[in-house]
Image (spheres, coloured by chain):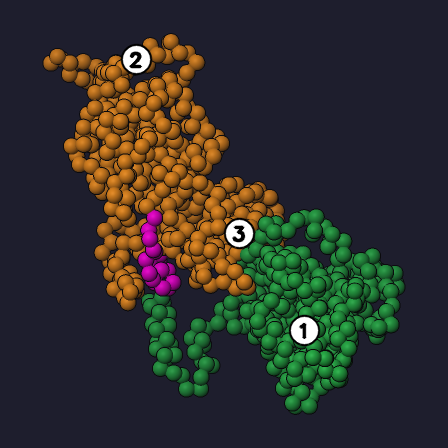
Chain colours: A orange, B green
């Protein structure tokens, strides 16, 4: 088997990404050279994508409606169909990403912003293309009559304004070969101070940054040297999750804290409510969401964002709860808007609606971005607790563990009680431990004694 | 003040009321004694072969761009007759100054289309020999080639040679200062020059109505004291006849001629353009009915110069040629970047030497 990888070319002049509108072929289809395989929409036009190789479609690397970067894998074509079946030992792709081996240990506890990787177009270091001009959001170098404009002519995905990532006023200055070097070495140019003229980042700056990089680079040579490893392109939702979490991990100095709560009353309340409202799928999570919304009203520091560019803390005027949801496409974060004013029943319905919509891939992209605080119910995976990564640019994320019987001390006696652990990661730039602890303690009290909700 | 009595009757400089047309949209031929043609059967068949070839390679070029093999490409689809008819009338010693959309003209001049398309791959392999084919390198900036042509023609006149210079351009180019200067100089100096304007109705997205208030582009000729000929640009026999006359006019020492070939660009301006944003499908359908190749085929079939078998043979040959163009371009290697500096000056300037060093350091750094 000989698989040729087809990458997304620059379909206009200086474009950085495109969206798959429609696939005209499926995996297993036999295609001819130059056969049209997809319709693709760029910022300039919807155009047809012809296959460069004849063969059998081995893989489609992006779903319909998915945006991919120029240079990213779009299609794999088996040009020697009928050869011996492939073994999984073969390294079949040299990809732009540097994923190693299996995708074991899914990031169940990580909240990803599925709608849009931030700042993707302008980040040359994130751009997957190897082509010389790929580093420009707007090329400026334009042939035959017109430019690409100052950025995208239009975007398919709207982003709720109050959560937009603080935009960098300008991208770091570096020449294309230096950008490529930075990309190869896994150096983020945003984090590098340029020593050249006008603050330009030089080759030496990049090398210096690479040797002092604190975290093990995803491009660790060991990963490339192993025989028999299966390599998988990091594209689509996976790629966006990767980009998004990398930004969060890099930018946010996060701290974690947690509490354990006796969920006896919570479960009793759930049973009571469920009996009174048999039409609603009432989960303990819905009540915890209500507690969380109340706590956020009381401690607005956690319903906020840190705007590094402006050096301001943005306190949001509305509570939009993101609900981390595992789907076939990967981790998505559908949003329940204006959750502060919702009852437990309304929250239960809303969560059910957005989560099932996300799983069925039926939510408009706008419903997958723009939360102000995120909750990850990793207890659903049988997990007690964890340190979730913040859904950038939010100030905090709550992890909800499983509710399970544990020994619990009541009146100096050890008894069995259903216990839930609540884990909070918070942006330490936005608030101090005292506020975070105040929030989590209040939340814990509400969870242990949910009748207190009546006071709110 | 009276008009100079030695000046020809100004009315002789104006285009006819209707575009000159010998072959209508249905392929019916009507002879016009004012615009004679002298083509034998083999030449008529050759026109057909060239037009089919141009269209096939054009489609291949668009595909190559969509596969990332070309940076950009400007399609000539719909303009085959305007290009091939006019170019077919050229004499060997004439010199063509093209814009970026003239692959059909290039084919007539014997330029290997792969050589031409290499330019859009961004390598210097795109160097066909301009002297050999008497076909200059393509010009991307609008209308500059009109000045090159005017200058060449003025030189040819001084040399006493019988070469004509021909500039190919679009309707939008006539709004550029360079076009004005070229028209004026060529005319004032009586230079043997023909300006072929393919009026394909749009300058990228700007329609002709927003381009000029002149009744037609051919009417602009009178302002410079040169005749303006206006023809159906989708009629390959009409464009041939008009060009033949224009070249004779210029070659006989009467100065330049402005030709307007009324045609339509069926594809996008370039592969980076979305024409659905500025023109209607109904317009496209109207022009599809005036297709230049369909009408010539009809004419040739009526004359029994081609049949199904010939049509099929021509189509297959065009496909084979497109395939070889593809093979020549696909993943073709890029040149050595250091050659950037090799042929600029006999003695490189300090600035160039500095840049040379910088680039070398960069390249070595990348290899390290």
Q: Quadrant of residue B75?
A: bottom right
Return the x and y of residue A307 as percentages of the image width and height: 28, 44
Q: Secondary structure at mark 2?
A: helix
Residue B81: x, y in percent? 74, 65
Q: Position of residue B209 (x, y in %)?
A: 65, 58
First reached walking from the N terminus: tag 3 or tag 2: 3
Q: From mark 3 to mark 1, how far is it between C-alphas?
A: 39 Å
| Position of residue A264 in the picture relative to residue B152 (left or right) | left
Instruction: Decide if residue A360 is on the left or right side of residue A444.
Output: right
A44 or B223, nearer to the observer: B223
Residue A163 falls left or right of residue A434: right
Residue annotated with mark 1: B223
Nearer the viewer's eye, disc 1 or disc 2?
1
Identify the magenta region: A167-185
> To which chain does the residue with label 1 belong?
B
Is residue A173 found inside the magenta-colored segment of the image?
yes
Q: Which residue is mark 3?
A: A44
Q: Residues within 10 Å of mark 1 (few under 14, many from 20)?
A: some
> Do callouts 3 and 1 point to residues on the same chain?
no
Q: Which mark is in front, 3 or 2?
A: 3
Q: Which residue is mark 2?
A: A269
Look at the numbered disc 3 and give the secondary structure of its residue.
loop
Query: x and y percent of residue A366 in the render?
Result: 44, 36
> What is the C-alpha distance between the residues marked 3 and 2?
55 Å
């Amino acid at each position: 088997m000989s698989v040729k990888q087809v990458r997304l070319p620059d379909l206009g002049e200086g474009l950085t990404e495109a969206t798959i509108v429609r696939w005209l072929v499926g995996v297993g289809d036999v295609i001819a050279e130059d056969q049209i395989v997809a319709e693709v929409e760029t910022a300039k036009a919807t155009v047809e994508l012809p296959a460069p190789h004849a063969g059998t479609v081995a893989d489609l690397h992006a779903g319909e409606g998915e945006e991919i970067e120029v240079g990213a894998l779009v299609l794999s074509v088996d040009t020697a169909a009928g050869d011996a079946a492939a073994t999984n030992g073969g390294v079949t792709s040299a990809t732009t990403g540097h994923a190693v081996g299996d995708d074991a240990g899914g990031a169940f506890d990580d909240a990803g912003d599925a709608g849009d990787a931030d700042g993707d177009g302008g980040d040359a270091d994130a751009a997957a293309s190897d082509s010389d001009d790929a580093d420009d959001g707007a090329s400026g170098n334009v042939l035959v009559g017109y430019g690409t404009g100052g950025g995208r002519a239009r975007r398919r995905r709207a982003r709720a304004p109050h959560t937009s990532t603080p935009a960098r006023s300008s991208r770091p200055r570096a020449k294309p070969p230096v950008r490529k070097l930075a990309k190869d070495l896994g150096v983020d140019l945003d984090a590098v101070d340029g020593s050249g003229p006008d603050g330009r980042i030089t080759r030496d700056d990049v090398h210096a940054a690479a040797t002092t990089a604190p975290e093990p680079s995803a491009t660790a040579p060991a990963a490339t040297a192993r025989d028999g490893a299966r390599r998988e392109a990091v594209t689509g939702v996976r790629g966006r999750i990767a980009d998004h979490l990398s930004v969060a991990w890099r930018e946010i100095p996060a701290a974690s804290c947690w509490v354990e709560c006796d969920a006896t009353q919570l479960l009793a309340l759930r049973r009571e409510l469920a009996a009174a409202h048999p039409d609603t799928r009432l989960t303990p999570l819905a009540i915890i969401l209500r507690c969380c919304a109340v706590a956020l009203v009381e401690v607005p520091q956690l319903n906020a964002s840190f705007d590094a560019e402006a050096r301001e803390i943005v306190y949001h005027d509305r509570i939009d709860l993101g609900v981390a949801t595992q789907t076939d496409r990967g981790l998505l974060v559908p949003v329940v808007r204006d959750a502060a004013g919702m009852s437990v029943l309304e929250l239960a319905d809303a969560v059910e609606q957005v989560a099932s919509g996300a799983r069925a891939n039926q939510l408009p992209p706008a419903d997958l971005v723009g939360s102000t605080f995120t909750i990850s119910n990793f207890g659903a995976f049988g997990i007690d607790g964890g340190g979730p990564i913040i859904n950038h640019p939010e100030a905090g994320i709550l992890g909800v563990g499983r509710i399970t019987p544990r020994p619990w001390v009541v009146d100096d006696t050890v008894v069995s009680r259903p216990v839930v652990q609540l884990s909070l990661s918070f942006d330490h730039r936005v608030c101090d431990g005292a506020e975070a602890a105040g929030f989590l303690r209040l939340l814990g009290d509400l969870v242990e004694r949910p009748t207190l909700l009546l006071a709110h | 003040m009276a008009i100079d009595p030695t000046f020809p009757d100004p009315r002789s400089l104006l285009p006819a009321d209707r575009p000159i047309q010998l072959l209508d949209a249905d392929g019916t031929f009507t002879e016009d004694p004012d615009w004679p043609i002298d083509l034998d059967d083999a030449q008529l068949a050759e026109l057909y072969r060239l037009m089919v070839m141009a269209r096939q390679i054009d489609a291949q070029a668009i595909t190559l761009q969509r596969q990332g093999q070309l940076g950009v490409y400007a399609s000539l689809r719909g303009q085959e007759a305007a290009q091939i008819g006019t170019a077919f009338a050229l004499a060997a010693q004439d010199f063509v100054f093209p814009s970026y959309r003239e692959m059909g003209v290039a084919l007539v001049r014997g330029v290997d289309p792969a050589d031409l398309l290499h330019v859009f791959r961004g390598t210097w392999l795109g160097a066909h020999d301009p002297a050999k084919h008497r076909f200059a390198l393509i010009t991307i900036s609008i209308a500059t080639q009109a000045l090159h042509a005017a200058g060449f023609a003025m030189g040819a006149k001084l040399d006493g040679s019988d070469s004509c210079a021909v500039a190919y351009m679009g309707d939008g180019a006539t709004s550029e200062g360079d076009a004005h200067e070229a028209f004026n100089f060529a005319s004032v100096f009586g230079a043997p020059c023909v300006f072929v304007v393919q009026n394909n109705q749009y300058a990228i997205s700007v329609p002709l109505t927003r381009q000029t208030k002149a009744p037609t582009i051919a009417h602009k000729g009178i302002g410079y004291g040169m005749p303006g000929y206006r023809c159906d640009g989708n009629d390959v026999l009409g464009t041939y006849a008009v060009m033949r006359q224009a070249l004779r006019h210029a070659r006989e020492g009467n100065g330049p001629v402005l030709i307007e070939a009324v045609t339509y660009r069926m594809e996008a301006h370039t592969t980076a353009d979305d024409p659905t944003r500025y023109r209607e499908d109904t317009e496209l359908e109207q022009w599809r009915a005036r297709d230049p190749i369909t009408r010539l085929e009809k004419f040739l079939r009526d004359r029994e110069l081609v049949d199904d078998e010939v049509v099929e043979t021509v189509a297959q040959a065009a496909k084979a040629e497109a395939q070889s163009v593809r093979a020549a371009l696909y993943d073709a290697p890029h040149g050595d970047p250091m050659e950037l500096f090799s042929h600029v000056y006999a003695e490189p300037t300090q600035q160039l030497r500095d840049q040379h060093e910088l680039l070398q350091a960069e390249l070595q750094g990348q290899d390290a």
